[in-house]
Structures are given as C-alpha cells and as structure tokens.
C-alpha cells in the first residue's frame, strides 16, 4: 500500500455489480463490500441509485455510505467538477486509512462513472478493479441468442451518437448493440427503419431484473418509449 505521513492509506476498490440481478454480483465483489469501511456509488439528482439497489442485500449496516450525484447532461464541464469533488471526498477516506469501494452497475471500465474517479486518483492510491457482468452479455442471455459466433463482428454503439455516425456504424458489422437508449429510442428506431433492419432488432428492457422484458422492435407501438433498454440488431448469416 502507499504510505504517506506515517499512515497507511486505504485501498480503493472499483466493483462491478453486473446489470441488475443481485445474484450476478461476483463472489469477490461481495467479499470486498463486506470488509470495506466506506461504500460510494453514483446517483441521479432526482432518483435513487441503481448501483445501491443492486448491492442493497450485501451492504453492511455499519458502513459509511457516499452517494455521489451525477448530473444527467451531455456537457462535460458540470460532470467534471462533480468528479473532482468526489475524488477529493474519497481521497479523505483513503488518507485516513479507510478502505473504500466504489460500486457501479455493469463493469467499472465499460461506460462507467468509476473510470473518471480512477483517472483522478490512480497516481496517489492503490486501486483494485473487480470486473462485473456487463449489460451486453446480460442482454444476450435475456434474448436467448448469442451475440456472435465464428467470425461475426460485434459493434457497441452509445445511443447519443449523432444520426450520421449511427447510420454508418449500424450499416456495418454483424451484431450491433446500441447502449444507453433511453430518451433516444424514437430517433434510433427511425434510423433502424430507414436501414430496413427493424425485423432484425430486439429491445431488451431492464435486463436480468424482475422487470425484464424482451420484445421485437417491430412489435413496439409508436407511442411506447422503453427507457432502461438496449437494442440488439443481428445481421449475421450463421445458420447453426
């Protein structure tokens, strides 16, 4: 461990919790959550934390909790200020010798809040990363269809991409996974329709949770807007 001013600093653990089902938390993540003094997690300003909900059955009663409010905006500057402050707050616990876990749904290094804290703290503190089951593989299990086989090419696209970039990326590749769909659903469906791929697209909502729903895109009404959803388009030719 890093040592400063005669005191052993705490270790920061970045723990991936998986896509939603608490039983998909790894044994290692569970073990570390049960031993740290501090557990931090991201949360939207106006609702509770998904990571906190997933981990709830395993969070000790006597642990110090840190809820870090992350603004739901595309602009980088407001979020950067919050990450700066969160990193300083976590650093205070680490400097006091408290082992700290930052929990996040999915995997810590795939579209995760944790990566921004890691960049701010990695030079001064010992950090251990524990991988988690991703929403991508959770969605594959939900739709009961492999994402790819043999030489299939997988593309993972963030829904906020501009229309031109989405069209170009969706048009190539064998399996297209569109993540962070949310409020972009109507726009993305229009692009998929224009590309003639509606019949090859599945929408997976709330993957691995008790509220999981898997529906073909073509069966979703125009006024229906699934929010916590991923769209998977499979164009491969594997006939099994």
Image: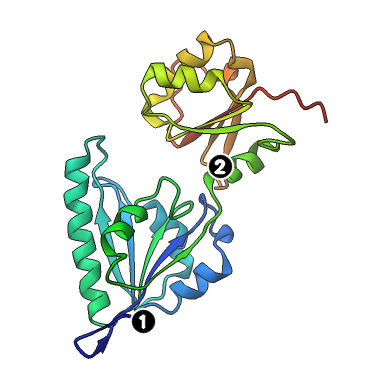
Q: Residue at x 40, y 61 (%)?
A: 103
Q: CA distance from mark 1 to mark 2?
A: 34 Å
- Which residue is at the front of the view, 184 or 132? 132
Residue 170: x and y, percent?
A: 52, 21
Q: Residue at x 59, y 45 (%)?
A: 138
Q: Is residue 40 left or right of residue 130?
A: left
- Which residue is at the front of the view, 218 or 16? 16
- The quadrant in which residue 162 appears is top left
Q: Which numbered mark, 1 or 2, is in the foreground of this view?
A: 1
Disc 1 + disc 2, Cβ < 8 Å: no
155 above or below 78? above
Q: Residue at x 24, y 75 (%)?
A: 93
Q: Is residue 170 left or right of residue 183?
A: right
Q: Residue furthest right?
A: 240
Q: Which residue is mark 2?
A: 136
Quadrant including the N terminus: bottom left
Q: Secondary structure at mark 1?
A: loop
Q: Is residue 206 left or right of residue 61?
A: right
Residue 72: x and y, percent?
A: 27, 40
Q: Is residue 205 left or right of residue 164?
A: right
- The quadrant in which residue 5 appears is bottom left
Q: Secondary structure at mark 2?
A: helix
Residue 84: x and y, percent?
A: 19, 56
Q: Which mark sits nearer the N-terminus, 1 or 2?
A: 1
Q: Which residue is mark 1?
A: 1
Q: Residues within 10 Å of mark 1 (few under 14, many from 20)?
A: few
């Amino acid at each position: 461990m890093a040592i400063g001013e005669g005191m052993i600093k705490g270790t920061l653990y970045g723990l991936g919790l998986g896509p939603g089902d608490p039983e998909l938390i790894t044994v290692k993540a569970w073990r570390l959550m049960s031993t740290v003094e501090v557990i931090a997690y991201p949360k939207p300003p106006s609702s509770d934390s998904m990571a906190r909900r997933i981990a709830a059955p395993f969070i000790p009663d006597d642990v110090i909790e840190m809820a870090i409010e992350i603004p739901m905006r595309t602009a980088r500057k407001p979020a950067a200020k919050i990450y700066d402050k969160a990193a300083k707050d976590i650093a205070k616990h680490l400097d006091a010798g408290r082992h700290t876990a930052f929990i996040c749904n999915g995997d810590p290094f795939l579209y995760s809040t944790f990566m921004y804290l890691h960049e701010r703290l990695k030079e001064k503190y010992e950090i251990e990363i524990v991988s988690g089951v991703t929403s991508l593989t959770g969605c594959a299990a939900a739709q009961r269809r492999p994402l790819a086989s043999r030489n299939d090419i997988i593309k993972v696209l963030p829904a906020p991409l501009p229309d031109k970039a989405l069209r170009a990326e969706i048009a190539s590749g064998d399996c297209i996974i569109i993540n962070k769909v949310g409020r972009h659903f109507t726009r993305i469906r229009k692009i998929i329709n224009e590309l003639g791929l509606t019949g090859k697209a599945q929408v997976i909502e709330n993957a691995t949770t008790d509220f999981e729903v898997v529906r073909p895109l073509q069966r979703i009404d125009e006024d229906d807007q699934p929010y916590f959803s991923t769209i998977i388009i499979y164009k491969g030719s594997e006939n099994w």
